[in-house]
Image: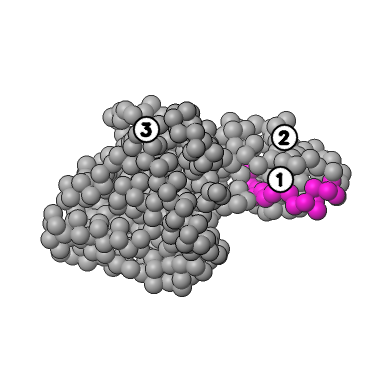
Amino acid sequence: MKRLPFLLTALCSVLPVALFASPDSSASGRPVTMLDALPILFSRTANAADTLPRKGTLGASFGPVSEDVRAANSLQPGVGLVVTTVAAGLTADKAGLKAGDVLISLNGTEAGPGRLGAVIRDLKTGQEITFVVLRNKESKTLKANYTEKPRDPGNSNYDVIYSHVVSNGARMRTIITLPKKPGRHPVLFFIQGFSPISYDFTLETATGDVNSLDGPILFEFANSNYVTVRVEKPGVGDSEGGPFETMDFTTELDIYRQAMKQTMEHPAVDKDNVFIFGHSMGGSFGPVVASEFPVKGLAIYGSAMRTWFEYMLDITRYQGLLAGRSAADTDEMMRISARLFALVFFEKMSVEDIKAKYPELASEAQQTFPNNTFSGKTLAFWRELNDTNFPRYLAQMKGHVLAVRGQSDFVTYDLCHQLMADTVNAARPGYGRFVSLPNSDHLFHTWATEKEAQVGYSRGKFNPAFTKLMMSWTKEIMSR
């Protein structure tokens, strides 16, 4: 029996197929003890006390080599990446790379899917980079110094501060917008989705595509006199720690805790009006953080609220049917999937344990959990996620909750978001609200149906409806 290829697992914010190759672009990213580190305050003088080194960027996007190009250049399978775009003024452009070049190696490491992530992470700003490319079947060696990644310059309404916090002994990059208008201001504290993509981009020019997810939302709040806070995941962008693939749930959770501490200590912050916004997997971290700090509200878009075991069973069945798998084949598949998820999530069994005790599941176990990972993460992450009682945290927090699901989001369910609102209202009547948003998929793209969103996933146009809804909701809550 063929295993269902998970169309979108783990509430992922999707990674672009052609990686924008900066240190955060780990080609393998697809889709514990919590130490109480002291926060480092940020100041309005950009980087005045910031000792976290700024990393660079290649400034190029790469895609797979087509069979025609591979044959024309006599390339072996798995060798090479095609340069699809080159950003002006950055490393690749300075070296002379052009769209259509075939990258053969980077600093002596052979290029190919999944091979350059570690090399890029270790690059130092200013060091010489050597590219070997094929151009019109001719080999060329191109060189340039590794260029610092551009900073968000802000605009006439807000400054952008690059700072950091310390979590588990590693420095995590925080990117804060501060209104230029004097006084204290409300806060939008953002927690991103699952994938290890960087949110270190210019908000004002963000379009909401896969390279600037949530950017238009953050820009609207930054430009409306809110403090906004972004924090880069461990091993992503300038952040230390990681690699992302080995991070468990509670270790990652601590970076948001430390960033919230930093936020609460700044004199420009109105502590009575702090809002958390968790998108996708960020909606799993959000309730835990909201239960530990006196936040005014928590907005969640496109997340889960039941056990991860329940969610995975639902998503496996539903996405299979949506993709055209027969009901009979899906039912057969679910019997095996349910056993596997139960053994891994609840019994804490490894793939080797499953193979030894249940040889009839050996093939499926290896395909579903290769090298004891799932969706590019170790099983520890998923077990801790499954063990977390999210309704308990929602009941414990003191603020309001806005739970929103896009009607074309084939990744999540109304049931979970209604449960969020119901849980809050049972503990604090009138504090929970569920909204079903038309023409909005998991990435806020304007697909009308779940099927359209599934077929065109990550290629839609940004829908500002959620931005307007959340802005209206925060203002309403603050006026009470």
In this view of the protein, which residue sits in the foreground, 62 or 378?
Answer: 378
The type of residue carrying mark 1 is: Leu
Of the two numbered discs 1 and 3 in the rendering, the one whose residue sits closer to the viewer: 3
The type of residue carrying mark 2 is: Glu
Of the two numbered discs 3 and 2 in the rendering, the one whose residue sits closer to the viewer: 3
Q: Estimate the spatial distance between the alpha carbons at disc 1 and disc 3, rounded to whole Å.
A: 38 Å
The residue that appears at 60% across and 48% down in the rendered structure is: 20
The type of residue carrying mark 3 is: Lys
* Pointer 2 residue: 110
In this view of the protein, which residue sits in the foreground, 346 or 135?
Answer: 346
* Pointer 1 residue: 81
Q: In which quarter of the image is the C terminus?
A: bottom left
* Pointer 3 residue: 348
In this view of the protein, which residue sits in the foreground, 319 or 159?
Answer: 319
Q: In the rendered structure, which segment of residues is drawn in magenta?
A: 56-73
Give the mark, 2 or 1, whose residue is nearer the N terminus.
1
